[in-house]
Image: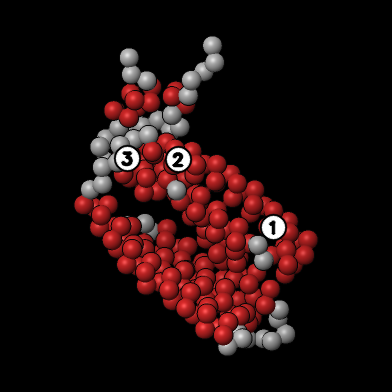
Amino acid sequence: MASPEQTSTTQAPEWFGSAARGIAFFPVMMSAYAVFYAAWWPFAWGYAGAGAFALVVVLAVAFVVRGVAQIRHASSFPNHPNDEDQRIGKAMGVLNSVTHPIWMLGSIVLLVFGQGRWVLPLMMFVIGAHFVPMARILGRRIDYLLGPVAMLGAIIAGVLALDPQVSWLVVFAVAGIGGAVATLCYAVYMARAYRRLCERAGVTFPLTASVPTPR
């Protein structure tokens, strides 16, 4: 007799395993980014910043738990990549190979010339900008909204960076607002997207029936 997990797996459409693997990890990744972006708040704004950072950490932990559950769920289904999956993977590889070196090399140049206060604004602007082509590649309109949110935080931080009286910690903290908001919203969106994907495929999430109950 087949186990509940095997039954659920055989009932899933062939495309589901690959599609699920493609988005399952996003809440975990976005949570890590959000914590990094918010980590500057306590240093810039004291107790208020620490409270806001603590809230981000709590949300991040919740999304990590959700993301791990999604990853485990997706891994229980066979992976059959199709032409569209390969197209997306190739396009994203090209995009990341262009955008990430820009802020990495730019950060090195800024540090060499003693302009480290611009590092996070640059990083956030480039990462926010790369959401725009990513929206076209992945066919997700949410990227058109969240990319400019991150870029706006970077621009405001850049304006503050022009004033030498403003601490670099404040500059980083302001840049981090846009990044934290964008990544947490993205985590919410991708968690809901995984749920919708399961519903479209007629797959139960989580596979609670596959967890043995004590007798």
Mark 2 surroundings: few (<14), some (14-19) or many (≥20) residues within 10 A: many
Q: Is residue 123 visible?
A: yes
SS assignment at label 2: helix
Residue holding disc 3: 17
Where in the figure is residue 180, as x and y percent of width and height?
57, 61
Q: Is residue 201 above or below residue 81?
A: above
Sequence-first tag of 2 and 3:
3
Along the horizontal axis of the image, is 104 left or right of 38?
A: left
Q: Nearer the viewer, residue 197 or 207?
A: 207
Tell me, yes or no, whether the two marked residues, 3 and 1, touch with CB atoms within 8 Å. no
The amino acid type of the residue labelled 3 equals Gly
Q: Circle 3: is it few (<14), some (14-19), or many (20+) Cα within 10 Å?
A: many
Coordinates of residue 127 in the picture (x, y in percent) = 46, 69
Query: Label 1, on which residue?
Result: 52
Residue 16: mark: none
Q: Residue at x 73, y 67 (%)?
A: 43
Residue in view at x 56 percent, y 66 percent: 178
Q: Which mark is residue 70?
A: 2
Q: Alpha carbon of mark 2 to alpha carbon of mark 3: how far?
A: 11 Å
Q: Amino acid at mark 1?
A: Ala
The N terminus sits in image quarter: top left
